[in-house]
Image: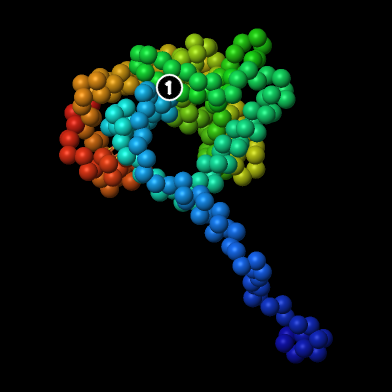
Amino acid sequence: MRNLMESMNIKKKSKKKKKVASFLGEDIIAGIDQILKKQNGTVWKQSTGFAPSGFHKCDRYLVYRLFGYQKESKFSARTHRIFDNGHYTHDRLCDYFDRMGVLVEVEREFWTVDPPIHGFVDAVLMINGNEVPVELKSISEFGFKKWKDLNSHDPKHYTQLQLYLWALDLPVGILLYENKNNQALLKFETKRDDAHIEEVLDSFRKAYNVFQDGNLPERPFEKDSKECSNCDAKIYCWADSRVGVPML
Ligand code: SF4
């Protein structure tokens, strides 16, 4: 073969990749990473109510949010870009709703009293003369395929939407997923589920009672657990000498 190629003057293609030269003396990717990483750090975080996404979080964390705690964020620059991409996806989808003539409001803010919940509904649409809250999520190809195959949705997103229905006193909402890889869309229409809403409200009320008593829930996880490792209150929580009370 070699002789045949040589005799035919055919040169083998080099498998070595050519390096892309940089002529500018500035690494633009390092520059982007640098400005995004500046968003990390320690800030005092305190809320006056529970977030609709909080039901699936640690009770101790929810109560720290009410008392306030030193939040440590150490996200990679790439994670910041993923967050930003999610925000821009919301803007783009709301722009489509606007052009369809169905958009009533973006980021509708609400407060409730018992229990105190503070949230923002991604979009409120007008469909057949009725207001319909919409929760928008940009998700991975893996997640998109999973929920499509199961013909179901993430329980956390379902809970969020149910709290919007309760807070806005509406009967039906929409959960809209967009695949981050290819922008395919997946829609779930959801009726108000009062039994689930009561379960969530009850859980928030118990945590709120602990807060009002000046206590904390005890830690439900081990220090090296996945939950604590992903918690931005971890350093604060595990340095706190208060054991806390059990959540019944
Ligand atoms: S570090 Fe762990 S126990 Fe403490 S608040 Fe976070 S998840 Fe809960």
Image location of residue 248, percent across then percent down:
22, 24
Q: Is residue 92 above or below residue 103?
A: below
Q: Amino acid at mark 1?
A: His
Image location of residue 98, percent across then percent down:
69, 24
Q: Is residue 92 toward the left or the right of residue 201 in the image?
A: right
Which residue corresponds to the image point at 80% horizontal and 90% vertical from the top-left? Answer: 7
SS at mark 1?
A: strand
- Report the image quarter containing ligand 1: top left
State the image quarter where residue 50 is shown. top left
Q: Which residue is mark 1?
A: 118
Which residue corresponds to the image point at 41% horizontal and 26% vertical from the top-left? Answer: 51
The answer to whether residue 213 is visible is yes
Q: Is residue 11 toward the left or the right of residue 56 in the image?
A: right
State the image quarter where residue 130 is shown. top right
Q: Is mark 1 within 8 Å of ligand 1?
A: no
Which residue corresponds to the image point at 54% horizontal and 46% vertical from the top-left? Answer: 81
Q: Is residue 204 toward the left or the right of residue 92 in the image?
A: left
* View extreme (right): residue: 8
Image location of residue 150, percent across then percent down:
52, 33
Residue 17 versus residue 74: which sits nearer the camera? Answer: 74
Q: Is residue 49 above or below residue 140?
A: above
Residue 232 versus residue 206: which sits nearer the camera? Answer: 232
The N terminus, quarter of image = bottom right
State the image quarter where residue 114 is shown. top left
Q: Is residue 88 toward the left or the right of residue 244 in the image?
A: right
